Amino acid sequence: MINQDWHSADIIAALKKKGTTLSAESRKAGYATSTLANALARPWTKGEIIIANALGIGPEHIWPSRYLNKARKTRTDKK
């Protein structure tokens, strides 16, 4: 089975289980409260890393489709 990206609701729930929120992590990183939500909808490396660090895992585990393409070993997005 191919790993699928986490659903945005699962990411939000995982953050809540860690005792934080997307808004809190966004503010902690110096962004507006809604800025990190961008990483849920489209590739944004900085945001993905902030969210992943808050969860204690690598961003490639949350968004495998955005990261390593096994054949080329490069990110699949161009941003």
Image (cartoon, helix red, strand yellow):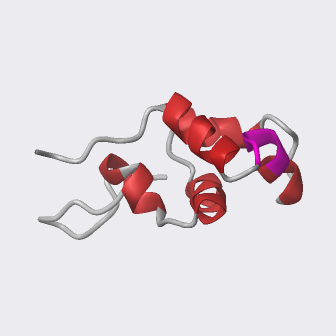
Specify the quadrant of the image occupied by residue 12: top right
For this rendering, which residue is in front, 72 or 61? 61
Q: Relative to residue 29, is residue 67 drawn left or right?
A: left
Q: Give the percent coordinates (x, y) of residue 56.
A: 57, 66
Q: Give the percent coordinates (x, y) of residue 47.
A: 64, 53
**Residue at the spot 87% in from the left edge and 57% down from the top edge:** 28
**Residue at the spot 88% in from the left edge and 50% down from the top edge:** 27
For this rendering, which residue is in front, 76 or 35? 35
**Residue at the spot 15% in from the left edge and 46% down from the top edge:** 2
Q: Relative to residue 75, is residue 3 drawn left or right?
A: left
**Residue at the spot 66% in from the left edge and 60% down from the top edge:** 54
Badge count? 0
Q: Give the percent coordinates (x, y) of residue 33.
A: 85, 38
Specify the quadrant of the image occupied by residue 21: top right
Q: Relative to residue 54, is residue 20 drawn left or right?
A: right
As drawn, the residue found furthest toward the bottom would be: 73
Q: Give the percent coordinates (x, y) of residue 29.
A: 82, 59
Would residue 30 be visible to someone looking at this image?
no
Q: Quadrant of the N terminus?
A: top left
Question: Is 30 located above or below residue 16 in the figure?
Answer: below
Main SS type for the magenta part?
A: helix
Q: Relative to residue 72, is residue 46 drawn left or right?
A: right
Let me know if residue 44 is in the magenta part: no
Question: Is 61 located above or below residue 33 in the figure?
Answer: below
Would residue 28 be visible to someone looking at this image?
yes
Q: Which stretch appears magenta?
A: 20-24
For this rendering, which residue is in front, 9 or 32? 9
